[in-house]
Image (cartoon, grey):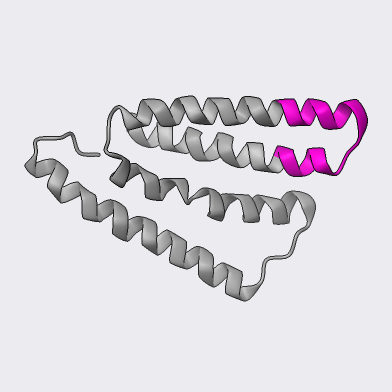
Amino acid sequence: MRLFLLIFFVVGFNSAAQLLLKAAGMRTGMEAWCLLALAFVCLGISFLCWFVALRHKPLAFLHPFAALVYVVVPGLAALIFGEAISGPYIAGILCIMAGICITSSAVRPREREEGGASC
């Protein structure tokens, strides 16, 4: 449970950073700089959560979950900034989600054989 909470924070803060960078790019002056600074803070928190997660699971298991940013960011960009998402892009998102399921489950059996903790 703790591992998936860490993954949630990694994806959440990384996604927030991407959206803040977009918002900063749409503004000027001090407001843009504050949003940019906040984006860097979010990236830092994401990095620290990723570091902690890597202490508990192999990179081969965790890395596919980083692709969830490609699912979350476009959806939130559509809601927040009114950006369009095309049908082929949605198909790509579904492929990413399928890939995450396939690749992360491919690592699990070997971890159990080695006595590693399972999720």
Asked if residue 83 lies left or right of residue 44, the reply is right
Tally of marks: 0
* Quarter assignment of residue 36: top right
* Quarter assignment of residue 117: top left
Looking at the image, residue 21 lies above or below residue 43: below
> Which residue is depicted at the point 85% across and 44% down?
26
Residue farthest toward the right in the current orientation of the protein = 29
Where is residue 31? Give x, y as percent: 87, 29
State which region is magenta: 20-37
Viewport quadrant of the C terminus = top left
Q: Main secondary structure of the magenta part?
A: helix
Residue 15 within the segment the image draws in magenta: no
Viewport quadrant of the N terminus = top left
Asked if residue 42 lies left or right of residue 27, the reply is left
Asked if residue 113 lies left or right of residue 9, the reply is left
* Quarter assignment of residue 53: top left
Residue 35 within the segment the image draws in magenta: yes
Front-most of 9 and 17? 17
> Which residue is depicted at the point 47% across and 51% down?
67
Asked if residue 106 lies left or right of residue 47, the reply is left
Where is residue 30? Give x, y as percent: 89, 25
Where is residue 22? Give x, y as percent: 75, 44
Residue farthest toward the bottom in the current orientation of the protein = 88
Where is residue 11? Give x, y as percent: 51, 40
